[in-house]
Amino acid sequence: MSNAIATDDPARWLETVATADPERVLLETGEGRRLNYGQMAALTRRLAGSLATLDVKPGDRVVAQVEKSAEAIALYLACLQLGATFVPLNTAYTFAELEYFLGDAAPTVAVVRPADRQHVQAIAAACGVKHVETLDDRGGGSLLDITGTAPENSTHDPSTLAALLYTSGTTGRSKGAMLTRANLASNATTLAQAWRFSASDVLLHALPIFHVHGLFVAINTVLASGSSMLFLAKFDADQIVRLLPRATVMMGVPTFYTRLLQHSGLTQDTVRNVRLFVSGSAPLLAETHREFQARTGHAILERYGMSETLMNTSNPHDGRRIPGSVGPALPGIEVRIADPESGAPCNEPDAIGMIEVRGPNVFSGYWRMPEKTAAEFRKDGFFITGDLGKRDAQGYVFIVGRGKDLIITGGYNVYPIEVELEIDALPGVTESAVIGVPHPDFGEGVTAVVVPDKNAPLDEATLRAALEPRLARFKLPKRIVFVAELPRNTMGKVQKSALRERYRDLYN
């Protein structure tokens, strides 16, 4: 029997429960504020009316750079209700970065934090954005002051665009991954079934809600199963340990688990009511997996996904969870290992190649980048993930490396070129190479290796200060080291593998 609500329209999940059981709690914040399904449905309709008054129509984009809150969830659901495209942005993005997103997404409305409104209005005007409104994390904001009525019982084709998620690009410009309503619906119902979600579950949610993990894996799975959330503004180990006895499921990035293992309050009694711990967004060290199981009796379930595909694989709910593996392909999703150049399948167990994916979860392409979209798909419809991996004889997938030097730090993706472009533009810098090296807390630490101009003395603190207004905090190098020259091969290409080896113990 399926534990997912019987609808393939993500806009209907909330209304289905709100109609049948309006008093069922949807979320409780860390401060004790509670919203039931009926209240969230009313809040969603209210914001849908606000957006409609601002002339948001099906297909229009709505950009959101706001703090985590119940209202932020309602804004997402209001976009689904109207058939608009939700564009969540990392709250750490600077105004300089925001200008690119507003220009590229061309939204009808941008919703930002109250303190940012005046500055964003100037940027928005230059980008042709009609409206800049606000939401805060205390239940207020100008968007809530706008009254209007949303269309009743509107239906939207499953193939229409539901969300635009910006993911870092190797050319220095972020790409907008276009996710359809069908993508969201299929993946959430698949996860609800695979992970045995039911209305009695309580998810401990401490993730940000501007990317796939916190929004589409966590919140959509809750809505698709009619379950509840303990909805925390951010990860705080003391608060997590205090609330774990009330939870049945927790989702987190590896950093959450390494920090919990450092907390004396994490015991088998603390997790007595939890049935499932899930980890994703970055590789979980096998050592962390084993230590957590020894401490709590729980084997963390690791899964694998990305902005373009949502979730692709998962260790089983019932069955063996292998440390270091992201598990077999989820039901209805095809995952293959292929030769990176030809795309020919590597059918032998443990053969290393490119991980490629096909299924109802896979996005429809990159926003306004048809050539890039065409280059990332094989002729038979498989999406080329850029991750290198292997699959054992039992079908379990292991990720062994990443193409394009992607750095995953604390669950966030950082492409070195984005950071290098900013460093190289600073006075006194000849060139730079940005790498990820092992970090005990973040998985990988963003690390910059800089060649200074011989006539311009530089120091780490000065360079980092100059980068702070130009880069989101998670992209900022945790360390900057200076060298006379970068290692190169005979073709003149910087050997980042040599740099990673040289500085592998920098954070130990």
Image (cartoon, rainbow, N blue to C red):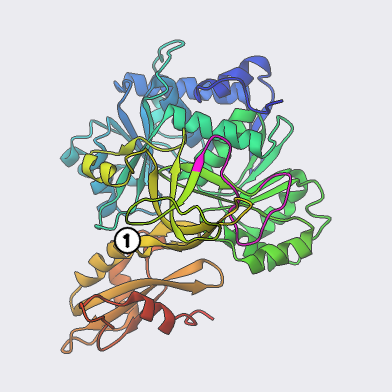
Label 1: element kind: loop
Q: Residue at x 46, y 54 (%)?
A: 346
Q: Position of residue 426 (x, y in %)?
A: 20, 72
Q: Residue at x 67, y 58 (%)?
A: 322
Closer to the camera in the image, 485 or 65:
485
**Residue 58 showing in the rendered view:** yes
Residue under numbered circle 1: 471
Q: Position of residue 458 (x, y in %)?
A: 26, 84
Q: Position of residue 50 (x, y in %)?
A: 38, 22
- Majority secondary structure of magenta residues: loop
Please identify the quadrant where the N terminus is shown. Answer: top right
Which of the 4 image quadrants contains residue 461? bottom left
Is residue 330 in the magenta section?
Answer: yes
Is residue 32 in the magenta section?
Answer: no
Lateral position of residue 43 relative to residue 288, left or right: left
Which of the 4 image quadrants contains residue 445? bottom left
Which of the 4 image quadrants contains residue 157? top left
Closer to the camera in the image, 24 or 67:
24
Amino acid, disc 1: Leu
Q: Residue at x 25, y 58 (%)?
A: 172
Please identify the quadrant where the C terminus is shown. Answer: bottom right
Q: Residue at x 27, y 46 (%)?
A: 375
Lateral position of residue 77 relative to residue 452, left or right: right
Measured along the vertical axis of the image, is residue 319 above or below residue 420? Answer: above
Q: Position of residue 107 (x, y in %)?
A: 27, 33
Instruction: Report the magenta residues as a range.
Output: 316-334
**Residue 27 showing in the rendered view:** no
Q: Residues within 10 Å of mark 1 (few under 14, many from 20)?
A: many
